[in-house]
Image (cartoon, rainbow, N blue to C red):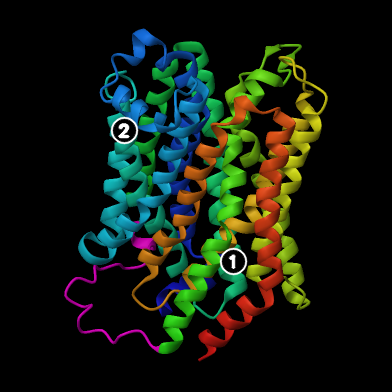
């Protein structure tokens, strides 16, 4: 770690060069995921699930019969559930990716394999028949990449510098947000002009750009060797490490309500905009898929202000603890969802909601994400017991896995409720999680600090 610290000190930003290579790589992975998210539900409802197209998709009829255990469902409901499982499994497979990195390939080679799988998945989206296979490739590829990239970010910083680490993850997450903002804009525009499959193909090409960036940055990244053959020789976890592990798992669990409420904007939110929000402008109608960029734009705008604000607070000893930031982020999600509910109140017709309410809610969602998710990753990377960084980073992604899957099932009831009621329910879920975190924040933070000190 000494060499890494010296590199960090030598950088004008105070952060190591490896951070920026990792950010650039993850930026394109997020371009891929959010570009897919912006198109997926619209693509399914408007094209893939048309009878003549759905009949060509291998395994789709069987999957629909499986999900219709509660009775026949609409295409909107089926699309919401498909999206929920796809997005959820993207966040589940980092556990597999972390195990492969820690025990077999090492983080660097695992990340490269993930990028290749994701590129293949996007190409497979160009055909109706391989739709479900394409989703499988994308899920596995993202799982190999996500947790291992985040674990490498944490390895760039000394364990003792919580504030710098937190700011490093915020910078890393800014790269994520740039990719997340540009993905829906580019894929949405290409899909509108050249068709859905062309939009998916663009993401495949840019994933190869991610691979090139990662290869070029190898010498600036922390060394990683798989632990196979070493685990048996390493000492078992101490009592303090076991306790810290349980505290980390509890903190991760407390982010699940936020991970139910926030991702709703990427699936049901896009359908809501398409159906209810007035998208007309003097230059024509804006593609509804572009709204999938709004929360990322909000996060990008918020990131430099938050980094400076937290640094200013840290100098004066008043910076909120990491756990407190997570709770604040959950509460902000609730506020943003209430803006959707209020904007739709009293309106039930197509194109009846002023776009300002949707834009404001999405931008504030981005601020909320910057508060709670990069901070959660920073907590895990700092407090993970020795030799478990990649696996525990994968475990952290269980929260969005559970959240996305539940969001898919909750979202399947969207067309059975008034939108204002639906978004108020979404806000209540996030608020409940935020209140729980803030109530126990002092105990959780104190327990982490005491265990690290021991």
Residue 337 on image: x %, y %: 71, 41
**Residue found at the far left of this picture:** 229
Q: What stretch is highlighted in magenta?
A: 218-238
Tag nearer the camera, 1 or 2: 2
Instruction: Give the image quarter of residue 108.
Output: bottom left
Which numbered circle lies on residue 121? Answer: 2
Which numbered circle lies on residue 259? Answer: none
The first of marks 1 and 2 along the sequence is: 2
Residue at the spot 74% in from the left edge and 15% down from the top edge: 349
In-image side of 211 versus 364 (left or right): left
Magenta-drawn stretch, dominant element (helix, strand or loop) = loop
Asked if residue 135 shows in the view, the reply is yes
Q: How many labels does the image show?
A: 2
Residue 249 on image: x %, y %: 48, 68
Asked if residue 290 shows in the view, the reply is no
Crowding at dot 2, Cα within 10 Å, few <14 / some 14-19 / many 20+, comes out as many
> How far, Cα to Cα, is label 1 from label 2?
33 Å
Residue at the spot 74% in from the left edge and 34% down from the top edge: 340
Seen from the viewer's position, the closer of residues 432 and 191 is 432
**Residue found at the far right of this picture:** 346
For the N terminus, the image quarter is bottom left
Residue at the spot 78% in from the left edge and 38% down from the top edge: 339
Residue at the spot 43% in from the left edge and 69% down from the top edge: 155
**Secondary structure beneath label 1:** helix
**Secondary structure beneath label 2:** helix
In-image side of 58 versus 41 (left or right): left
Residue 222 on image: x %, y %: 36, 67
Residue 284 on image: x %, y %: 69, 10
The residue identified by callout 1 is 166
Does the magenta segment cover residue 170? no
Seen from the viewer's position, the closer of residues 212 and 197 is 197
């Amino acid at each position: 770690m000494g060499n890494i610290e010296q590199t960090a000190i030598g950088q004008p930003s105070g952060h190591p060069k490896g951070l920026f290579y990792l950010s650039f790589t993850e930026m394109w992975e997020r371009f891929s995921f959010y570009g897919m998210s912006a198109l997926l539900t619209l693509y399914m409802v408007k094209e893939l699930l048309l009878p003549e197209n759905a009949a060509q998709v291998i395994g789709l009829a069987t999957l629909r019969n499986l999900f219709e255990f509660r009775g026949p469902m609409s295409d909107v409901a089926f699309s919401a559930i498909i999206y929920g499982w796809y997005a959820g499994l993207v966040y589940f497979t980092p556990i597999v990716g972390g195990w492969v990195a820690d025990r077999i390939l090492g983080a660097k080679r695992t990340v490269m394999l993930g990028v290749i799988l994701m590129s293949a998945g996007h190409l497979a989206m160009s055909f109706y028949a391989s739709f479900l296979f394409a989703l499988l490739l994308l899920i596995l590829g993202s799982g190999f990449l996500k947790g291992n990239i985040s674990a490498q970010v944490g390895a760039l910083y000394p364990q003792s510098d919580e504030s710098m680490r937190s700011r490093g993850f915020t910078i890393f997450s800014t790269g994520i947000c740039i990719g997340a903002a540009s993905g829906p804009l580019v894929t949405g525009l290409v899909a509108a002009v050249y068709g859905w499959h062309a939009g998916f193909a663009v993401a495949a090409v840019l994933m190869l750009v991610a691979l090139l960036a990662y290869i070029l940055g190898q010498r600036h990244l922390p060394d990683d060797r798989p632990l196979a053959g070493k685990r048996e020789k390493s000492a078992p976890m101490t009592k303090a490490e076991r306790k810290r592990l349980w505290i980390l798992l509890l903190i991760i669990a407390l982010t699940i309500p936020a991970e139910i409420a926030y991702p709703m904007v990427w699936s049901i939110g896009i359908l809501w905009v398409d159906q209810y929000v007035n998208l007309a402008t003097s230059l024509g109608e804006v593609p509804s898929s572009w709204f999938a960029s709004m929360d990322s734009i909000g996060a990008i705008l918020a990131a430099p202000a938050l980094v400076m604000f937290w640094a200013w607070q840290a100098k004066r000893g008043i910076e909120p603890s990491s756990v407190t930031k997570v709770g604040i982020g959950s509460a902000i999600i609730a506020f943003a969802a209430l803006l959707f509910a209020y904007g739709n109140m009293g309106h039930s017709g197509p194109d009846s909601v002023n776009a300002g309410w949707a834009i404001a809610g999405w931008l504030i969602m981005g601020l909320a994400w910057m508060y709670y998710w990069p901070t959660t990753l920073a907590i895990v990377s700092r407090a993970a017991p020795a030799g478990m960084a990649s696996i525990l980073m994968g475990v952290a992604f269980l929260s969005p896995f559970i959240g996305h899957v539940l969001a898919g099932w909750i979202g399947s009831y969207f067309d059975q409720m008034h939108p204002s009621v639906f978004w108020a329910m979404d806000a209540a879920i996030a608020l409940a999680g935020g209140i729980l975190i803030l109530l126990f924040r002092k105990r959780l933070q104190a327990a982490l600090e005491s265990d690290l000190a021991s």
